[in-house]
Image (cartoon, rainbow, N blue to C red):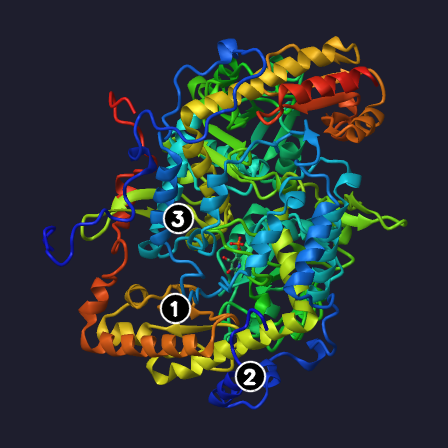
Amino acid sequence: MSTHDRTEPTREPLTGTLIFERGAAESRCVEAPPLDVPVVSLGGYARAAAPALAHVTEVDIARHYERLASANFGVDSGFYPLGSCTMKYNPKIDEWACRLPGFAGIHPYQAEETVQGALELMWGLQESLAEVAGLPAVTLQPAAGAHGELTGLLTIRAYHTAQGDPRKRVLVPDSAHGTNPATVAMCGYEVVQVPSDERGGVDLDALRGLLDTDVAALMLTNPNTLGLFDENILAITAAVHEVGALAYCDGANLNAILGKTRPGDMGFDALHINLHKTFATPHGGGGPGAGPVAVTGALAPFLPGPVVGMTDDGRYTLVTPARSIGRVRSFLGNFGVLVRAYTYIRALGGQGVTEVAEQAVLSANYLRVRLGDAWPVAYDRVCMHEFVLSGGTMRKEHGVRTLDVAKRLLDYGYHPPTIYFPLIVDEAMMIEPTETESKATLDRFADVLLAIAAEAAEDPDLLHGAPYTTPVRRLDEAAAVKEPDLAWRPQEGAGV
Amino acid sequence: MRFIPVTCEDQVEMLRTVGLSDVDELFADVPEAARLARPLALPEPMGEVELAAHLKELARSNAGADDVASFLGGGCYDHYVPAIVDAVVSKPAFFTAYTPYQPEVSQGTLQAVYEYQSMICQLTGMEVSNASMYDGATAFAEAALMAARVTRRGRVVVSGAVHPEWRSTLATYVEAGTVTVTEVAAAGGVSDIAALAASVGDDVAAIMVASPTFYGRLEDLAPLAELAHGAGALLVVGTNPILLGVMEPPATFGADIVVAEGQPLGSPMSFGGPGLGVFACRQAHIRQMPGRVAGRTTDVDGRTGFVLTFSTREQHIRREKATSNICSNHALNALAAGVYLSAVGAEGLAGIAGACVAKAQYLEQALVATGRFERVHAAPFGYEFALRYRGDVAEMQRALLDAGFLAGLDLGRFSADDAGLVLFAVTEKRTRAELDRFVEEVGAL
Ligand SMILES: Cc1ncc(COP(=O)(O)O)c(C=O)c1O
């Protein structure tokens, strides 16, 4: 393309120019307040050479990040059916609430009598999550889902150790998220993979064959990562308990079952809840989230501290459970995220929370059926809040991969679904619409996916080359590893 | 239904398309015995007006930074956050996005992460920074695990001068026996280097210290690096990113991994979270580094662009052999840190850090001069210091709270050995007038 095209005058690309390359040497934004006490030097510890940071004014910063933001896609930009991640709308009142000075401006080591409102909020959230989980004890400490897994598994480990029965292995289905086996390894257990059956659930016979008294736990996502509710769940948890093992639930998919069934009622002993999925706290471009863990009464004494308790005279207080595994992080959890989740739950109430699950599941099934025969569903039955398509046939027939389809979706203005997960589906494409999308949005998206299927048949190269309309096109990931450029550095002698 | 845009009519049609007549039929796979046969017992829903009032009331019942002058620190600090920081992190295209799995529509996040990594490298002097961890404590624990992988050794030696919550987080992370920890008691608010030397052997993966220490004191890092490297171990250093505006960075002295609690860089205190875990290391060790990392590359048209890279370390590819189980991180706080550092620049950061240091020295001298406090540590300090109170700490803090001050951190709550010690942090927000009034109140106790 000519850079002197009359119809397309040259514009500065939205991204690529670094903040360090903006402004001028004398540009300043915020300056330190004037010093009203004598200057002190750190002497031998003083910094010899200043770090090379940006030299910019406030307007440079405002424009720079506005440009970066326009090159980004979030839930507020459009439909974001990223399976397993529950990219639902993030209510604005949650953002307002966490910024209230009485929440944003408090320190974790303040005396309890000066933070009763914050502790009351945490206590209320613990209670609500316990009710949703069907498990009585909750810790709000974990910072994300994977951190919740670590917390839950270490709690289970401490329980077994206290029974004088330390165990060696943890069973994980082949459809599990990567964090599950990674967590198992961090907890010093051996990972044993459990195969799925032909309906997409846990292969019960295989599971029974793997269970023995060296198994500490089964880690299971239910509904699972195929978007299916495991019909044998009660038999599964019973079999696990029969050998003295415990059942851990990865609660990533809790959005599907809110108020309909509860992990505790399914026989799970521990569960982590992703507040950044189910309870509408924003994903932040990768985080922060929060991964509270709910457990049975038997596991409660082992939870990490502190948790919020209530004294006899109705004051809220921080307590460390009697046989706690200790801390899993500093301070009290991602409080700013907890405020958002609490706000969301208080806005919805019990019925509202249940309607979330009903609509999330209905919307997923609607989309599944709308896509019809053009897109084979990996396990074609009524799904929960998400479903997984297989692009295997499309690859065979047209040489078009799921990656190409995802890139083509970008041209149509959608964030693609999760791709290549779960690993047990060939060319997987996992679609989770969530409850916060209108029927019109779902219809338009279905039409687009059908149109892309037609494009794939007629002109595969169109898809191989996609996307065409995004701020940048396909990026050279191999070069990024071969010649790593992981940080900007000032040029020698450039005097930045 | 405020957040559900599907109308009742649409619902009926959607059900019909699916071939069902009732929503409950969608849940047929749930065994009868596991179904919840009653409504969820959650508090009644609230409209936005009522809800806002309720939240305001909860928030108002806390004593926040606007109500009291705080000398609390210990890893979470009352620094000023420039208005531009929240203006940027409030942009929905940043905060409603997720991990940049599709780089073509995530260049904003990816470039911001790359810039953040660059700034952390500049601040710490290290070659590589990851995209963030959860907090300083988990970054510290992950540093121990990484050092064990790099050296193929199974023991770390940790200075007792490191934040007690970082040490207990590490202890929890390695509870399963993946790494063993030897703790060496602090002396004078810093590491006891002779005692550290005595416990270091050729089985040690890392010596782990912090500068400033939990007690606010600065470590002499060069001999610690020599000790570590002499034994074939790594030196892991926890630090304070604001103080790096005026303090020589750990890399100069040979640190191999640098971690920090990043909250001071533009995140509100927010009752201790979310902040972020800063994690930086040597390029040679990148394949053992935990967490995500962004890199600069080009697209098919030759345009500069950014991607997540070195992903083969991570759980979604490597599963049980991953360098960590971390998936979601604290990207939005990393964005805040990048905006903060751009807003203040190197000069502003030096000015802010210098103001903190100067005010802390001023307060320390004045408090000692009251005769109510005495010095217990001799090493130089940054903007945090501990003194022994000649009296009942809890009583003193209660009295000063009534006067409008959060009078430091009672170190007795962490360790009986430190009973009677109070840790004071002084940020650039504290004015001389506040310091003088505080000293006056102390004198009047
Ligand atoms: C099924 C499943 N398990 C675990 C996780 C990890 O959660 P987090 O990213 O919050 O650590 C995810 C999310 O990415 C997930 O989808």
**Residue A148 seen from this side:** no
The image position of residue B163, as x and y in percent, is: 64, 29
- SS at badge 2: helix
Q: Amino acid at mark 2?
A: Cys
* Residue A407 to residue B433: above or below: below
Pinpoint residue B261: horizontal percent, then vertical percent.
Answer: 55, 34
Chain letter of disc 2 in the image: B
Disc 1, disc 3: CB below 8 Å? no
Q: Residues within 10 Å of mark 2 (few under 14, many from 20)?
A: few
Residue B109 circle label = 3
Q: Is the residue at mark 2 from the same chain as the one at mark 1? A: no
The image quarter in which residue B425 lies: top right
Callout 1 amino acid: Ala
Q: Is residue B119 left or right of residue B273?
A: left
Give the Cα separation between the discs numbered 2 and 3: 37 Å
Q: Who's the residue at 37% across and 39% down the image?
A: A59
Q: Residues within 10 Å of mark 1 (few under 14, many from 20)?
A: many
Q: Position of residue B243 (x, y in %)?
A: 52, 23
User: B98 left or right of A14?
Assistant: right
Residue that badge 2 annotates: B8
Looking at the picture, tell me which residue is in the foreground, B217 or A227: B217
Query: Label 3 crowding class (10 Å Cα cut-off): few <14, some 14-19, many 20+?
Result: many
Judging depth in this view, the residue of A392 and A72 nearest the camera is A72
Quadrant (top left, top right, bottom left, bottom right) of the C terminus of chain A:
top left
**Looking at the rendered structure, which numbered label has been put on residue A428?**
1
Instruction: Please indicate whether residue B19 sits to the left or right of residue A404 in the image.
Output: right
